[in-house]
Amino acid sequence: MRDWSKARAHFVGIGGAGMSGIARIMAARGASVSGSDLHDSTSLAGLRTLGIKVHIGHAASNLGEASIVVRSSAIPLDNVEISAAQERGITVIERAQALAELMEGKRSVAVAGTHGKTTTTSMLTVALQHCGFDPSFSIGATVRNSGTNAHHGSGDTFIVEADESDGSFTAYKPLGAIITNIELDHVDNFNNLAEIEAIFRDFVQTIRPQGFLVLCADDHGTQTLLSELRSTNKKNLLIITYGEDALSDVKLDRIHVGAKSAAARVIYKGRVLGEMELSISGRHNILNAAGALAAAIALGANPMEVIAGLKLFTGARRRFEIKGVVNGVTVVDDYGHHPTEITATLETARIFANGGNVLAVFQPHRYSRTQAFAPQFATALSAADHTYLLEIYPASEKPIVGVTSSLISSQMESSKVSYEPSMPMVVEAVAGKAKAGDLIITLGAGDVSALGPLIIQSLESHKTQI
């Protein structure tokens, strides 16, 4: 194991959710940490308060006396700092490798799946904190309960969100894992569902012998994986299933979803544990909580204490995050950027609105994802009363000829969609259309989240004019 107290670590792309979390933990373990990013942010401001030196912009001089450089997957190999590090013979490691090293010697749990990773990881963390575990954690979003995305805990448990997007989660080698679901996504890296399924199989093979695996019994993708594991489980993994399926180890029934809460009866291996109540809405979140409960039980936590801890969870940033209420109009922001996620989120929005209209502002994320899922996006977004469709957020992709947001809008009823690339126009349009009792939700993994405060300002302006 590396002695981090003697390390001088420099992060290239330190502002990212995953990178900033790892930097926090390294600093807490005594490492001298610095980093660089193209733009300043509240995340970087938080790192500075920890004594981490942050540079805005990339330059070879930013390396200082670094003994190790951590590279974000968003940073190209020809980046000036990466090139300088290689020329100087400084060890360069990937983000996932850095996190894997921090996990060594801990009872680690990696939470994976196409959807629900952040929420499930956050739920498990908050529940274990309530049980007195004080786990270390690294999550791809800020947990509202703690106000941070990462923490170096005093306990022997380490909870991490395991992102499958580039396959790097096979580096972690955890004691246990949760897989919430398996669907086709990240079509910039994977050509088809078979490739996604293969990388999840590889991930399972990295779990330590005699470890545990928690799987959602209700998802087709995890059902396929489960059937394979039952025929060959060479590592003797403890497999725990959860869901509404009658054969689930952690079985849910009597599910009720309210505007700001959700509940279900929980039965563990035939024994009724009682009712699990959440302080957030969403049928999908009841499933996420069941996955967290199963993993906590595998770690030795008291099931009833875990259930009590889950009720304390108040959500993660950009996961159905209420930004404000103006004149009876609620403004919500959500990270949903896959058709399945949007379907679940809009179902929750409909319950929350309780008869009011649901107005969605959606920004597709990546040209490749839009091209692959345009019909599914159109179907999912049709659950809103009206959708304002922004242009595609490219992330790191180059444009694909003929691929614009119109691929989605052209497959929706014209009365239910407005294709408007201009963000200022959308802000005014949606604020002008909303009335008391309605819910406005911004959706997407790009910069659409910045519109929430602007919509609130516009609603305030409309209120003043009235």
Image (spheres, helix red, strand yellow):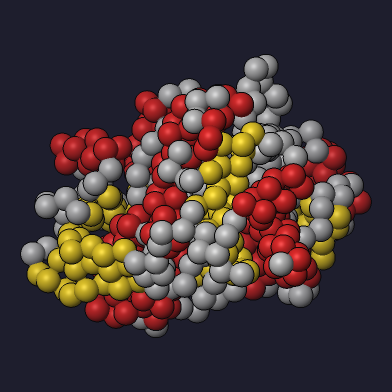
Name the residue nearer the viewer: 5 or 134: 134
Q: Quadrant of the N terminus?
A: bottom right
Q: Quadrant of residue 449?
A: bottom right
Q: Quadrant of residue 321?
A: bottom right
Q: Return the x and y of residue 42 as percentages of the image width and height.
A: 74, 65
Q: In this view, which residue lies farthest toward the left?
A: 270
Give the vertical position of 429 relative to 329 (above or below). Answer: above
Q: Return the x and y of residue 233 as percentages of the image width and height.
A: 21, 42
| Horizontal relation, residue 2 to residue 124: left or right | right
Q: In this view, which residue lies farthest toward the front?
A: 466
At 49% from the left edge and 54% from the top edge, which residue is drawn? 357
Q: Quadrant of residue 292?
A: bottom left
At 46% from the left edge and 65% from the top edge, which residue is drawn? 122
Give the vertical position of 237 relative to 403 (above or below). Answer: below
Q: Return the x and y of residue 288 as percentages of the image width and height.
A: 35, 58
Q: Return the x and y of residue 437 as percentages of the image width and height.
A: 50, 64
Q: Quadrant of the C terminus?
A: bottom right
| Horizontal relation, residue 197 to residue 8: left or right | left
| Horizontal relation, residue 263 to residue 84: left or right | left
Give the number of callouts.
0
Name the residue nearer the viewer: 315 or 191: 315
State whether residue 433 appears in this view: yes
